Image (tube, rainbow, N blue to C red):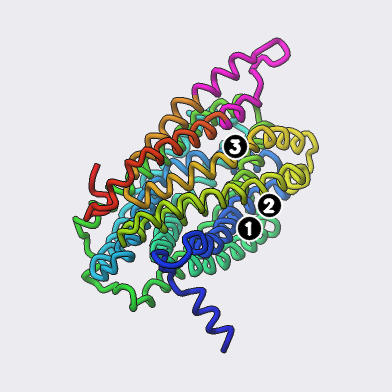
Amino acid sequence: MAIKEKLQEFFKPIDMTEGSPVGQIMKFTIPMLIGNFAQQLYNTADSVIVGRFVGDNALAAVGSAGPILNLLIVLFIGISVGAGIIVAQYFGARDRENLSRAIGSCIVLTGAASLILMIVAPLIAQPMLRLLNTPDSIIGWCRQYLVILFLGAAGSGYYNILSGVLRGLGDSFSALMYLLAATLLNIVLDYIFVAHLGLGVPGVALATIIAQFISAILCLRRLTKMKDIFELRREHLRPDPANMGRLIRLGLPSGVTQAIFSMSMIVVQSLTNSFGEQFIAANVIVMRVDGFVMLPAFSFGSAMTTYAGQNVGAQKLDRVEKGARDGTLTAMGVSAALTALILLFGRHIMGIFTETQSLIDLSFAMMRIIAVGYIAMEVTQCLSGVMRGAGDTMTPMWISLLTSVLIRVPAAYLLVALTKSPEMPDGNSAMLFVSLLLSWCTGALLTFIAYRRGKWRRFVNSPEGGGEE
């Protein structure tokens, strides 16, 4: 009985408008951090299994498909962010009817976005891969991987949006449990499809979409049982112009931000591809490890969005500011410790993906360049999360535009060009990671300045919670 009560307490949505700010943030962040860790295992399991059982080129193929995949799922990212903000604000304001309508609008909008992606994306995958100068040795695998994932886009879309709704309601634990189950299934299916059935790269894509559909179904089932907080009747599943307008208005800047980031990654990917298959594979390994080191930043950032959203809805500006300060400092400490571990044991971690020693050495050398940038990313994600939660989604978008497009991309091409020599006719590939570090540190500085200037505070007294410009 005690265990059942403990589980019920864990599953209970968190009201972040009361109690210790940093305590509530940590209580919300820890399940999300574990969940993001599990989410990262989706891509990492794909990479490890194809790298071990198919080869380094298959590893490069899965990684090369990533920027295109990220670019084409920005619709879901935008809806998810907008949903989290609106749900958190209505939950903080105790507005049951509008909360019900908002959740219904999320479900309708996600269905439309999924349909668009399933039709359009498979048609443009091959031309985009050609545009990126993807080597002929891996382009076939890249296309197969992308087409399968896009045809299963509804599972990924609904999981991301519905888990965003759960987090907006303060329930990060439920989404965590469902994600852990789906991640375990994904890893098992990866092994069966690739190691035993010999399906190769298409096998890991098939395993991913099956697992994502299951996690989406579990999230929907959980929401239908939260009748004490909101209702999900048939009339709530009709397009609601007011809530759909707010979803788009609040979520579009984040979607655009991700699109900008993905476009910059695609442009840089073209430069990455010019260094050959081994550097592509090294870049994949670094980005997979990077995904784990970034987990505290993204987890604390999402927690700060929900925290700020609920307290803005409750008109508690003092709690927003205290939580922003304490949460950011805590996140920086966590990231510093994790970065130190990565630097100490990095070579062993790189060895999980491949047995090729030269590839392990190259990957670790690139990882050392960007290590200090992870602490800077904590500042960017946490303070951007506060601004988004308050309704100011435009400022983080402009900062991302500046750092990703006007700093990262030109710096990458310029630094590579400046390092060309007879010994390195294509330039120094390490400059790609130096440019990334430069953009991260600049983003942290600009985000801190924007937060201190306080444009986001004007949204606190706005009745629409982000309806102002």
Residue in view at x 36 percent, y 61 percent: 310
Q: Earlier in the sequence, mark 2 or mark 1?
A: 2
- The three-letter amino acid code for the residue at tag 1 is Asp
What's the mark number on residue 49?
2
Amino acid at pointer 3: Gly
**Which amino acid type is marked by label 2?**
Ile
How much space separates mark 1 and mark 3, taking CA atoms? 32 Å
The reply to whether dot 2 and dot 1 touch (C-beta < 8 Å) is yes
Residue 433, magenta (yes or no): yes
Q: Which circle's residue, 1 or 3, is located before the other in the chain?
A: 1
Q: Is residue 114 visible?
A: no
Q: Badge 3 local density, few (<14 within 10 Å), some, or many (20+)?
A: many
Q: Vertical placement of 380 versus 169: above or below?
A: above
Residue 239 appears left or right of 342: left
Crowding near the residue tagged with mark 2, few <14, some 14–19, many ≥20 C-alpha atoms within 10 Å: many
Image quadrant assignment for residue 229: bottom left
Q: Secondary structure at mark 1?
A: helix
- Label 1 sits on residue: 190
Left or right of residue 6: residue 280? right
